[in-house]
Image: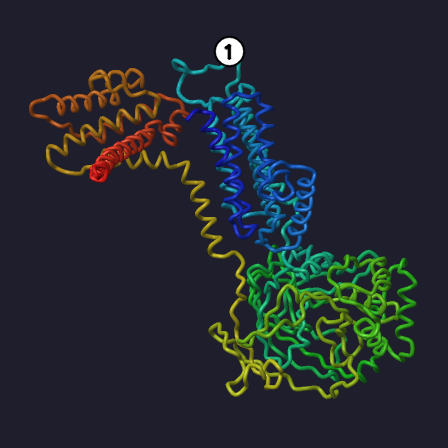
């Protein structure tokens, strides 16, 4: 293989090694095989055009055209002319796929599904980077700057992964770059001045011009390498991430000290709508509870309490360590009935976000990891990268059961709370206030006004639930929603909260999940389509109270219906003192209570048992094994020549057999090893010479001296004894002599030649020769068999010809 061919192969392998960083991002990982195949075609086209040869820019142009044709055949065959040629419809299809892929990046948690849009982004990106690397490193013979796009590919993957990727992927990307640099060697363009130091100049070796600085190219290479590695480390911080789950942009509590830190504002609108429109209701949480009725067991993630006219979002709040016992819920008095329940939850491996879903109001949370507590919203947020992926935790919470009378008689909220949670933007359209007054006309208190608002949205107002409606949470979106009367939970909850604030009722919006669906084993399953938003209104003595204005979603609370439960406090359900020791899927109800009755709430409360994680564990074992196989292939394939030489050397110098014939075979094998070692170091073998002349030639061309030269002559003398003496006397210490000769040959050549002798030994061509000989033997044998078959067929046909 020519030097340029080897360089092209290294550029191909280096691109795949850098692209390996994207394997954990998309599932299944079969897209990588497709990218590797298309990239191989692209590299092959480059090799063919360089052999023609074409001008360098024309070579790159031909490769770019082939890349466009490949992407067209894979992603836009239906829109292409004759299924191959790209036209306007093809580029329009590419635009649609790229837009869809961009939305999918912001929609899915890692690993994201391999949608057509995401596949076009990752495969097209790999081909584009591969084209850039091949053009720079092979066509223009400048491997050093080729490291910039190569390691930028890793940087993009690290950025999409949330600011960083595994050290293994970085190591692979950096290794690919370094292998590419080494593969170019002395064939680099003179403008880079790249030379490899080593032994003093010898015959045929390039010498810098007088006055030149031999260390300047080294410094230049170091600067380029440092710049490329810097790109790989810095760029991820500036890229968007494949975020985790329901909330699209979350902050964290990574402030200094155990009590410091803040959480940033979040806007869940886009991710919430995308979750509701998923084709598959992928399970994100499974839980088991001792509550007899789960219809009010909403899993709350975050509260949006600030409305600035453009969006509802959560205020920046101070966070602190999670206390053993969470404080008493704000505004809740002892006169209101509550039931204490315990819930054990398990998040799926694919569900990754910074906020922890909790029943509200939680009073105790048991979870491992770096979590912080935000007291105002009573939420838990991950610190320093902590997220919900695979989390298993236990929550003690309260089911608050106020009566209509208690809500109607609620006193005015505290002034500070009233000011903060009734604030509306100055530009709020008058239609919002006027509609709120019209809808609540005749109500005598805030409770009646809240119920009238809820019923107007959910039942009486003629609204239609539709998740495909254009999203928006600002004042214009609310006005449009009140006019068109169609939207999904975000529109209903945000509009009701805004209208409640115009009426002087403190209001905010909660985002989370509805209770989910029961499973045969007694657990509850929550999927992406259970993502939901609902308004919370504050009533002094009860606290923050849930309402449900969205039709066909969730359930309206009992206290908003005409018939309310009695106001006597109920006894708390007694959770078990300790969780079960083993995970189990056995229903927690007693044997006398069938699962169906338990799900309907007809059985007494029982302690929840620990549950198994959801069936979606994130990255599958098959994907992991596939990644390992690909990584091993990428790493080991370039090392196969070296491994083969090590194995052959060990076999030749082994100590097998004790007979004179075995000793003679070892002598001849040692001589063959010396000839191959010299070949690896640049001395071509000459089988026409006698051992004595061949030894003198190796000593002369290899510039061997002292012990190394004597060792060559000793082995040559032993070979003559084996071949020509009447009574052969095989030599001894052959392995030591061969080792001494290898050291001498290595000391007399440059570092590049020594490295090439190790990683790409020339003598490995013997493998090709051996395979060629075996193939020739097989074809010859088959030719003999074919002649025999033809002969027998003639004999068998001969009688039929003689008839008649």
Q: Is residue 510 left or right of residue 610?
A: right
Query: In screen coordinates, is 251 left or right of 445?
Result: left
Outermost residue on the left side: it is: 726
Residue 169 lies, with reference to residue 447, above or below; the image says above
Residue 418, given in percent of the width and then of the height, sits at: 84, 69
From this viewpoint, which residue is outermost toward the top? 210
Find numbered disc 1 in the image and state the secondary structure of the residue it sits on: loop
- Front one among 53 and 253: 53
Q: Quadrant of the C terminus?
A: top left
Residue at left offset 53%, top offset 39%: 38
Image side of residue 1 versus residue 327, left or right: left
Q: What's the coloring here?
A: rainbow
Query: Looking at the image, can residue 544 be seen?
Result: no
Residue 573, given in percent of the width and then of the height, sits at 61, 83
Q: Which residue is mark 1?
A: 210
**Corner quadrant of residue 570:** bottom right
Quadrant of the rendering where the N terminus is positioned: top left
Q: Quadrant of residue 58?
A: top right
Whole-percent x and y of residue 268? 72, 59
Rendered position, 563 above or below 413: below
Q: Residues within 10 Å of mark 1 (few under 14, many from 20)?
A: few
Q: Nearer the viewer, residue 618 or 718?
A: 618
Point out residue 141 in the picture as x, y percentages from the top left corner. Answer: 53, 24
Residue 790, relative to residue 617: is it above or below?
above
- The residue at the point 22 percent across, 26 percent down is 671
Relative horizontal placement of residue 652, taking residue 753 as reference (left or right):
left
At x 90%, y 59%, the residue is 426
């Amino acid at each position: 293989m020519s030097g340029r061919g080897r360089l092209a192969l290294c550029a191909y392998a280096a691109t795949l090694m850098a692209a390996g960083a994207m394997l954990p991002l998309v599932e299944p990982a079969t897209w990588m095989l497709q990218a590797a195949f298309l990239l191989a075609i692209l590299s092959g086209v480059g090799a063919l055009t360089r052999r023609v040869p074409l001008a360098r820019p024309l070579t790159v142009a031909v490769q770019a055209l082939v890349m466009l044709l490949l992407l067209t055949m894979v992603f836009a065959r239906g829109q292409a002319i004759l299924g191959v040629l790209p036209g306007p419809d093809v580029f329009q299809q590419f635009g649609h796929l790229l837009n869809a892929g961009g939305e999918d990046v912001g929609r899915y948690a890692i690993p994201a599904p391999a949608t057509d849009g995401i596949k076009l982004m990752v495969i097209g990106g790999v081909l584009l980077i591969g084209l850039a690397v091949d053009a720079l490193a092979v066509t223009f013979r400048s491997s050093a700057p080729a490291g910039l796009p190569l390691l930028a590919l890793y940087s993009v993957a690290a950025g999409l992964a949330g600011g960083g990727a595994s050290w293994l992927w970085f190591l692979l990307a950096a290794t690919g770059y370094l292998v590419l640099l080494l593969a170019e060697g002395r064939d680099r363009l003179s403008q880079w001045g790249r030379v490899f130091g080593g032994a003093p100049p010898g015959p045929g070796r390039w010498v810098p011009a007088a006055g030149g600085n031999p260390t300047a190219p080294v410094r230049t290479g170091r600067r380029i390498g440092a710049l490329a590695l810097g790109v790989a480390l810095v760029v991820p911080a500036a890229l968007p991430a494949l975020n985790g789950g329901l909330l699209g942009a979350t902050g964290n509590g990574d402030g200094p000290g155990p009590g410091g830190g803040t959480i940033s504002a979040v806007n869940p609108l886009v991710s919430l709508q995308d979750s509701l429109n998923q084709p598959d209701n992928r399970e994100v949480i499974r839980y088991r509870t001792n509550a007899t009725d789960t219809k009010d067991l909403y899993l709350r993630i975050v509260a949006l309490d600030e409305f600035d006219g453009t969006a509802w979002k959560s205020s920046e709040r101070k966070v602190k360590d999670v206390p053993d016992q969470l404080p008493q819920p704000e505004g809740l008095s002892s006169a209101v009935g509550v039931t204490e329940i315990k819930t054990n939850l398990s998040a799926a491996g694919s569900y990754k976000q910074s906020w922890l879903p909790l029943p509200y109001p939680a009073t105790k949370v048991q979870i491992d990891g770096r979590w912080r507590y935000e007291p105002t919203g009573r939420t838990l947020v991950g610190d320093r990268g902590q997220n919900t992926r695979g989390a298993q935790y236990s929550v003690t919470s309260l089911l608050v059961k106020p009566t209509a009378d208690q809500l109607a008689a609620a006193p005015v909220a505290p002034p500070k709370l009233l000011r903060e949670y009734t604030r509306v933007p100055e530009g709020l359209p008058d239609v919002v206030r006027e509609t709120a007054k019209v809808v609540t006309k005749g109500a005598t208190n805030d409770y009646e006004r809240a119920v009238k608002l809820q019923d107007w949205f959910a039942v009486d107002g003629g609204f239609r639930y539709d998740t495909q409606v254009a999203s928006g949470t600002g004042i214009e979106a609310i006005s449009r929603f009140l006019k068109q009367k169609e939207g999904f939970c975000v529109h209903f909850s945000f509009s009701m909260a805004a209208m409640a604030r115009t009426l002087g009722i403190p209001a905010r919006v909660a985002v989370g999940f509805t209770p989910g669906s029961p499973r045969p084993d007694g657990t509850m399953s929550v999927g992406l389509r259970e993502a939901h938003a609902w308004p919370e209104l504050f009533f002094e003595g009860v606290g923050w109270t849930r309402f449900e204005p969205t039709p066909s979603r969730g359930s309206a609370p009992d206290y908003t219906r005409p018939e309310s439960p009695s106001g006597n406090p109920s006894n708390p359900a007694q959770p078990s003192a300790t969780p079960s020791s083993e995970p189990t899927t056995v229903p927690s109800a007693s044997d006398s209570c069938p699962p169906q009755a338990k799900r309907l709430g007809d059985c007494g409360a029982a302690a929840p048992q620990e549950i198994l994680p959801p069936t979606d564990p994130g990255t599958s074992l098959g994907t992991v094994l596939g990644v390992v196989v690909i990584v091993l292939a990428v790493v080991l394939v370039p090392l196969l020549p070296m491994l083969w030489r090590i194995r052959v050397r060990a076999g030749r110098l082994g100590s097998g057999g004790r007979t004179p014939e075995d000793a003679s075979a070892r002598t001849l094998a040692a001589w063959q090893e010396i000839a191959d070692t010299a070949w690896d170091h640049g001395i071509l073998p000459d089988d026409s010479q006698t051992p004595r002349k061949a030894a003198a030639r190796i000593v002369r061309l290899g510039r061997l001296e002292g012990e190394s030269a004597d060792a060559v002559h000793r082995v040559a003398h032993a070979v003559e004894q084996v071949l020509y003496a009447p009574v052969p006397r095989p030599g001894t210490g052959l392995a030591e002599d061969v080792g001494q000769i290898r050291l001498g040959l290595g000391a007399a050549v440059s570092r590049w030649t020594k490295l090439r002798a190790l990683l790409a030994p020339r003598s490995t061509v013997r493998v090709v020769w051996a395979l060629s000989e075996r193939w020739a033997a097989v074809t010859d044998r088959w030719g003999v068999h074919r002649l025999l078959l033809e002969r027998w067929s003639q004999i068998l046909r001969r009688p039929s010809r003689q008839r008649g």
